[in-house]
Structures are given as C-alpha cells and as structure tokens.
Image (cartoon, grey):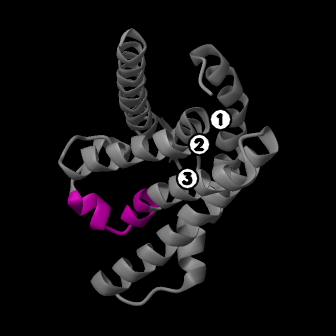
Amino acid sequence: MTTMTTTINNTDKLRTYDMVLIAMFAVLMAVCSWISIPMEVPFTLQTFGLFLTVGVLGGKRGTLAVLIYILLGAVGVPVFAGFNSGLGVILGTTGGYIVGFLLSGLAMWLLEKLIGRKTWALVISMLCAMVIYFVFGTIWYMAVYTRSTGAIGLTAVLGWCVIPFIIPDLVKMVLALMLTGRLRRIMKLQ
C-alpha cells in the first residue's frame, strides 16, 4: 500500500511540476514578445521564446506552453507584441505567425519523437519550426490583407514579413540552442 501511495504522490508532483513549468514558459513567451529590439525593422524576442520553450520543455510541455500563451492572448491578456491581445490580433494580418507558433511547436514535438533531442536534432526541428511559422504566417497575411485591403503580391509580403526577420530569427535560434542544454541541466529535465 505504501508503494502505491508513493507512486501516486510522485505522479501528482510530476504533474504539478509540469503545470508550473508550462505556466512559467508561457509567461516567458509573453515577456519575450514585449521586448522589442529597435533596428531598421524592429523585432521582438517572441520567436526566441518559442525556441527556448520547446527546446527546454520538450515537445509536449513546450507546445502546451505555446497554446497557453496563445489562449491568454485570445481572451484579452496583453501577451502579444506591443502589449496587444484579443481575437482581433489573432485574426488580423499577423495572427498567422502567432498560430504558426503552435504549428511549429507541434512540428518540433513530432521531430523530437522521430529523431530525438540531440543538439543536431534540435537544430533541424528549430529550422523546420521557423519555416512553418513563416510559411503559415505569410499565407495567412496574404489572405487577410487581400480580403481587407486588396490583392498583394508574394514578393511584397516576403519583403515586409519574412526577409527582414530571417537573420534575427536565426540569431535567436542559436541563442536558444545555447541556453537549452544548460537550462535543462539546471532544471534537471529529462
């Protein structure tokens, strides 16, 4: 009986620990989205938050943290870039990039299951994640923009929404990779 009680208690603690980690990293994503780096084209650390969250927590917990982050923003908590929130942001022109973060988390989770969590596997999964949020976000942007304003060419959208962000996102990916292993060791995550 004692062994069964200990097992149940350990399982409950793990679940509580998982919930705390998921909540902490959802908040981390919000904080990262608020930090704007002034450049010719300003950018936030939102994608750094995505890479670090899924990198440290792994696919399942990381994707749940991304989902919580998006749901918080959807119900009005100002977690998106520029302290914005609401369904209007998600359904707006740039909302596809936010939804793309969830798809990216799911893809990283799938790749984690298929190729593991070694550093080279994380590099591949983060690159795939970047392609996914850029592609999904760009398609979404074009659809919403066309519906609300008029037709727009792919070249224009790539020039506004993708090309200026490729190098900064690669830098954020490298920084997240550098921190991922260290944080996993400190937090004693498997």
Q: Going by the image, does 103 lie left or right of 24?
A: right
Q: What amino acid type should be assigned to the residue bearing mark 3?
A: Val
Kindly report which numbered mark, 3 or 1, lies closer to the viewer in this rendering.
1
Q: Quadrant of residue 151?
A: bottom left
- Seen as rendered, the residue at the extreme left is 75
Report which residue position mark 1 lands on. 176
Could you tell me if the residues under marks 1 and 2 are in contact, i.e. CB atoms within 8 Å? yes
Q: Position of residue 137 (x, y in %)?
A: 48, 68
Q: Quadrant of residue 68?
A: top left
Q: Residue at x 41, y 44 (%)?
A: 64
Q: What amino acid type should be assigned to the residue bearing mark 2?
A: Phe
Quarter containing the C terminus: top right
Q: In the rendered image, is residue 46 in sight?
A: no
Q: Residue at x 53, y 75 (%)?
A: 157
Q: Nearer the viewer, residue 115 or 169?
A: 115
Q: Going by the image, does 91 lie left or right of 151?
A: left
Q: Which mark is residue 51?
A: 2
Q: Secondary structure at mark 2?
A: helix
Of the image marks 3 and 1, the number of the one nearer the N terminus: 3
| Above or below, 21 relative to 63 | above
Count every numbered label the image shows and give the total: 3
Q: Position of residue 148 (x, y in %)?
A: 28, 82
